[in-house]
Image (cartoon, rainbow, N blue to C red):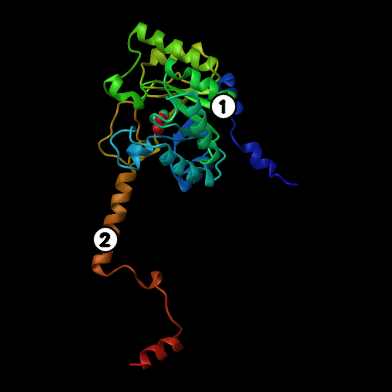
Amino acid sequence: MDLGSETIMARVTTYRIRGKKKKGKKIVMLTAYDAPTARILSDCGVDLILVGDSVGNTLLGYESTIPVTLDDVIHHCKAVSRARPNSLIVGDMPFMSYKVSETQALENCGRMLQEGGAEAVKIEGGGDVVDKIAAVVDAGIPVMGHIGLTPQSIYELGGYRVQGRTADGAEVLVEQAKRIEEAGAFSMVIELVPTETAKLITESVGIPTIGIGAGPYCDGQVLVLWDMLGLFEDFKPKFLKKYADIRSVISEAVKAYSEEVRAGVFPDETHSFEMTEEESGRLYGRT
Ligand code: KIV
């Protein structure tokens, strides 16, 4: 039986992600929430696709990630997995979908793989989630941790503020990172911390760190795709580099289309269908 060995070989695994740290190779992660985008990221060789709860801010119109439900993320994860990307698909566990108990974490992380088609899950939090991470990993589900600024705890943290800014704060994050590694996570996101703190965390653990707003010394980097493509005018955090201006591209196209429709220029002959001459004659001969 031909299992399409080339395709299978090319698929990114958690094993390969861990190996990248050992080899000193940087890891590339981006978010995606739909099939065509997932296909593009995969074709560009992106290592990890995160179906982030950032879908709440980017696509669903919420002001934070708090209202995003497990069903929301599973819905988008399904779309991403239908694209069958070679990139490893990570499903982001949304607010209150894993913190209640180990049983709840196991059931919901299981749904993310079984229904959503994810190959790993991401769990936000420090010491409070270590036992959940251990239980989920024990069940055979790869887990990516997420420390520093954890947007699901935004009210407790008092806003989107840089974390680990003091030496004591950095030590706390290093301890959290070590415990997450001990619990069996295969990697972790570090969000919005000073460069020095992220460097110390990265040097303190054997698993890859993937930074967002955490400076250049992490083992990899992640950005929210719609942010780096420049879809939002008002979102300009210091860490965000805009690699494109998709908002302008969309606006220009929509304006051009609107003008042509209003002027009766679109559709023209090349974008319309015709009958055969005979049928056309018969049609008009009827009147
Ligand atoms: O939901 C998300 O997109 C994330 C990234 C910012 C890491 O958690």
What residue is at 60 percent from the left and 23 percent from the top?
A: 19
Counting from the top left corner in percent of width and height, residue 31 is at: 43, 36
Q: Secondary structure at mark 2?
A: helix
Q: Nearer the viewer, mark 2 or mark 1?
A: 1
| Type of amino acid at the residue the image marks with label 1 | Ile
Q: Secondary structure at mark 1?
A: helix
Residue occupied by mark 2: 258
Counting from the top left corner in percent of width and height, residue 210 is at: 46, 24
Whether the residues at callouts 2 and 1 have beta carbons within 8 Å, the answer is no
Please report whichever mark, 2 or 1, sits nearer to the chain's N-terminal start: 1
Q: Quadrant of ligand 1?
A: top left
What residue is at 32 percent from the left and 48 percent from the top?
A: 249
Q: Could you say which is closer to the camera, residue 207 or residue 27? A: 207
Counting from the top left corner in percent of width and height, residue 179 is at: 49, 13
Numbered badge on residue 77: none
Residue occupied by mark 1: 17
What residue is at 54 percent from the left and 19 percent from the top?
A: 207
| Type of amino acid at the residue the image marks with label 2 | Ser
> Circle 1: is it few (<14), some (14-19), or many (20+) Cα within 10 Å?
many
> Circle 2: is it few (<14), some (14-19), or many (20+) Cα within 10 Å?
few
Q: Could you say which is closer to the camera, residue 253 or residue 12? A: 12
Q: Is residue 198 above or below residue 117?
A: above
Q: Could you say which is closer to the camera, residue 124 or residue 43? A: 124
What residue is at 31 percent from the left and 45 percent from the top?
A: 247
